[in-house]
Image (spheres, rainbow, N blue to C red):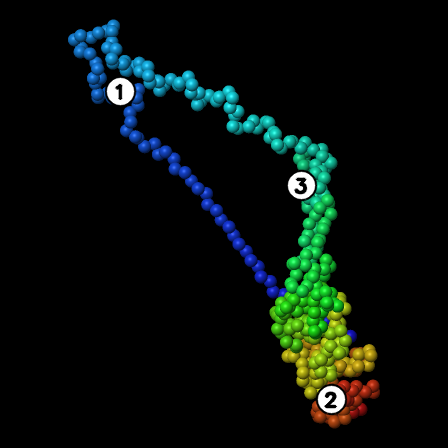
């Protein structure tokens, strides 16, 4: 069984928003002159109309009808002397506390912790983490992380323990929430979904795909079997498989399978390819090694025999340039239509051919069959070589 690497490409949408605010302002008195003179300063250009004749001054008895400019009228309080009932604004009322608290007095609602160890800071709630004491001050702890990574569970913490309650309402219609696998189809035998057609376990318009974490449902892709899936998802029933290395690496859609009956592409397709680090398998490609047909660009067809004795075909990634008689160590050293044969240390690229006709062979080469006959789809295969 060949082993390849699984590649998944999922698209994400991010949303963002920003908010702003503005500060208000106020106008200040510009100090504009109102034109109203100070009541204590008489107009120097206006004589007092009540001043008695200078020839007959009454020095001792001022006119009682004319108040002395320096003596305020009894009915009007002197602006320079505060009324006894009006407290002086510069001296606070004894009954009114100072609006600014004394910096040396702690707020009555915030007692000074004065801790000496974590036991002085423990609030008894393990959900918000273990409090610590640093320099006589209590410091908050790190809250418990109760996120279980399952999209349909409601995560919470109570009494120092996490609770992950399943919520079917967070799943699509017809699915239920499983605390381990998320939203699943209760009528589906696979968990949480089936990759092989006909798929189950996913909602309408979705398909089951393999990821590094396991199986998941995603919006169904449209890349056909054998298509390039390096930037898009395969159609339902296929998985994106990476083969080769470096510049020769390809990512192609392959049919998911549980056994050979699931591989419906042709006689050469077989449920033989295991995926690295998992139990899932995919089908080989049906192709013709001698005719050099049936493989995606950049790959070449070869014939294989399973441990059970079944002959099947597949398309190998990263074909080289070696042709008839070229030295090789692995089949990818050889060009399409050729494969690497012979004992270790003296292997060479030889052309695939159909025995006994050998129409694929040229020059002095002839089609030789294998001692252990290699028969595929009713046709015996061999390789072109020189006699002797």
Q: CA distance from mark 1 to mark 3?
A: 71 Å
Please give the name of the residue rendered at 62% of the width and 74% of the height, measured from the top-left corner: 223
As drawn, the label of residue 353 is 2
Kind of element beneath mark 2: strand
Which is nearer the N-term, disc 1 or disc 2? 1
Foreground tag (1 vs 2): 1
Q: CA distance from mark 1 to mark 2?
A: 131 Å
The C terminus is located in which quarter? Answer: bottom right
Quadrant of the rendered structure where residue 370 is? bottom right
Marks 3 & 2, CB-CB < 8 Å contact: no
Which is nearer the N-term, disc 3 or disc 2? 3
Mark 1 crowd level (few <14, some 14–19, many ≥20, 10 Å Cα): few
Q: Is residue 210 above or below residue 321?
A: above
Decide if residue 332 is in sight here. no
Which is nearer the N-term, disc 1 or disc 3? 1
Where residue 69 sits in the image (x, y, percent)? 28, 15
Task: In this rendered view, identify the residue nearer to me: 200 or 97.
Answer: 200
Where residue 108 sits in the image (x, y, percent)? 61, 30
Q: Is residue 43 above or below residue 351?
A: above
Marks 1 & 2, CB-CB < 8 Å contact: no
Please give the name of the residue rendered at 82% of the width and 81% of the height, measured from the top-left corner: 309
Task: In this rendered view, identify the residue nearer to me: 59 or 376.
Answer: 59
Which residue bears the numbered disc 3? 140
Where residue 201 sits in the image (x, y, percent)? 70, 67
Instruction: Name the side, left or right, on which 95 lies relative to 63.
Output: right
Q: CA distance from mark 3 to mark 2?
A: 77 Å
Marks 1 & 3, CB-CB < 8 Å contact: no
Where residue 220 sits in the image (x, y, percent)? 63, 70
As drawn, the label of residue 42 is 1
Please give the name of the residue rendered at 65% of the width and 79% of the height, measured from the top-left corner: 296
Mark 3 crowd level (few <14, some 14–19, many ≥20, 10 Å Cα): some
Kind of element beneath mark 1: loop
């Amino acid at each position: 069984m060949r082993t390849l690497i699984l590649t998944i490409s999922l698209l994400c949408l991010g949303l963002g928003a920003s908010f702003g605010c503005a500060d208000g302002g106020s106008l200040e008195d510009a100090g504009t002159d109102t034109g109203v003179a100070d009541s204590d300063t008489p107009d120097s250009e206006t004589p007092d109309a009540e001043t008695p004749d200078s020839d007959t001054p009454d020095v001792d008895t001022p006119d009682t009808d004319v108040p002395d400019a320096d003596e305020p009228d009894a009915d009007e309080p002197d602006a320079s002397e505060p009324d006894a009932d009006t407290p002086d604004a510069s001296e606070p009322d004894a009954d009114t506390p100072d609006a600014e608290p004394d910096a040396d007095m702690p707020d009555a609602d915030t007692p000074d912790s004065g801790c000496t160890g974590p036991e002085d800071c423990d609030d008894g709630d393990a959900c918000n983490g273990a409090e610590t004491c640093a320099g006589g001050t209590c410091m908050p702890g790190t809250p418990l992380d109760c996120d279980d990574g399952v999209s349909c569970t409601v995560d919470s913490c109570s009494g120092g323990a996490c609770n992950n309650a399943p919520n079917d309402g967070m799943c699509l219609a017809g699915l239920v929430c499983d605390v381990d696998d998320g939203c699943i189809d209760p009528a589906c035998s696979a968990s949480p979904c089936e990759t092989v057609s006909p798929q189950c376990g996913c909602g309408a318009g979705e398909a089951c795909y393999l990821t590094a974490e396991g199986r998941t449902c995603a919006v169904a892709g449209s890349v056909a079997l054998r298509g390039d899936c390096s930037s898009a998802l395969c159609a339902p029933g296929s998985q994106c498989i990476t083969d080769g290395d470096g510049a020769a690496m390809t990512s192609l859609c392959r049919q998911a399978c549980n056994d050979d009956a699931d591989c419906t592409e042709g006689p050469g397709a077989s449920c033989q390819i295991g995926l690295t680090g998992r139990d899932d398998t995919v089908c080989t490609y049906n192709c013709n090694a001698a005719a050099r047909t049936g493989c995606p660009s950049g790959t070449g067809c070869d014939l294989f025999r399973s441990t059970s004795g079944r002959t099947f075909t597949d398309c190998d990634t990263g074909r080289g340039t070696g042709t008839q008689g070229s030295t090789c160590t692995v089949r990818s050293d050889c060009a399409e239509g050729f494969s690497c044969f012979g004992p270790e240390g003296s292997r060479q690229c030889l052309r695939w051919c159909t025995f006994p006709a050998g129409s694929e062979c040229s020059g002095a080469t002839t089609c030789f069959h294998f001692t252990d006959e290699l028969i595929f789809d009713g046709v015996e295969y061999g390789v072109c070589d020189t006699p002797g």
